[in-house]
């Protein structure tokens, strides 16, 4: 009975580590802030590498696409504030790496 419990624990541990590795492989970090009438974004992978050429899409609170662009070689992308609204910024860094960041209306307004 004890051997069965040990095998079950080992199987659960292997599955947990496998799924954790899969999730981490598709992680990407995205941060954004508003300042001086612009929104600035920074994108990078967990190992610190910049997301170069990542597709950035910006949506308002009604899920309407406002702006699209790509990150530069340093993982940066900025744009003029398109509306005083909640802005959802979505990053597609290819190969399943995606992230989103929402700037609340109050943050956008404070940064204009």
Image (tube, rainbow, N blue to C red):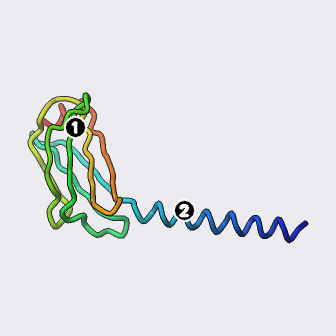
Q: Is residue 20 left or right of residue 101?
A: right
Label 1 CA crowd tier, 10 Å (few <14, some 14–19, many 20+): some
Residue 29 locus on image (x, y percent): 33, 57
Name the quarter where the N terminus is drawn.
bottom right
In the rendered image, the vertical position of residue 91 relative to residue 87, given as above or below: below
Residue 26 locus on image (x, y percent): 40, 61
Front in this rendered view, residue 22 or 73: 22
Could you tell me how far apart the alpha carbons at marks 1 and 2 are, in whole angstroms?
A: 31 Å
Residue 41 locus on image (x, y percent): 21, 51
Label 2 CA crowd tier, 10 Å (few <14, some 14–19, many 20+): few
Q: Is residue 25 left or right of residue 78?
A: right
The reply to whether discs 1 and 2 touch (Cβ–Cβ < 8 Å) is: no
The structure residue drawn at horizontal position 15% and vertical position 38%, both measured from the top left corner, is 66
Which residue position holds label 2? 19
Q: Is residue 82 left or right of residue 9?
A: left
Say what secondary structure mark 2 lies in. Answer: helix
Which residue position holds label 1? 59
**Which residue ends up furthest to the front in the rendered image?**
95
The structure residue drawn at horizontal position 20% and vertical position 62%, both measured from the top left corner, is 75
Quadrant of residue 89 in the image? top left
Quadrant of residue 27 in the image? bottom left
The structure residue drawn at horizontal position 34% and vertical position 59%, both measured from the top left corner, is 97
Residue 47 locus on image (x, y percent): 36, 70
Front in this rendered view, residue 105 or 5: 5
């Amino acid at each position: 009975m004890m051997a069965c419990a040990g095998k079950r624990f080992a199987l659960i541990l292997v599955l947990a580590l496998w799924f954790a590795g899969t999730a981490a492989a598709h992680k990407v970090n995205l941060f954004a802030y508003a300042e001086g009438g612009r929104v600035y974004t920074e994108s990078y992978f967990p190992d610190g590498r910049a997301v170069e050429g990542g597709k950035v899409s910006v949506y308002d609170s009604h899920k309407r696409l406002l702006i699209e662009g790509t990150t530069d070689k340093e993982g940066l992308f900025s744009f003029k504030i398109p509306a005083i609204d909640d802005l959802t910024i979505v990053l597609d860094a290819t190969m399943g790496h995606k992230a989103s960041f929402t700037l609340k209306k109050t943050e956008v307004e404070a940064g204009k």
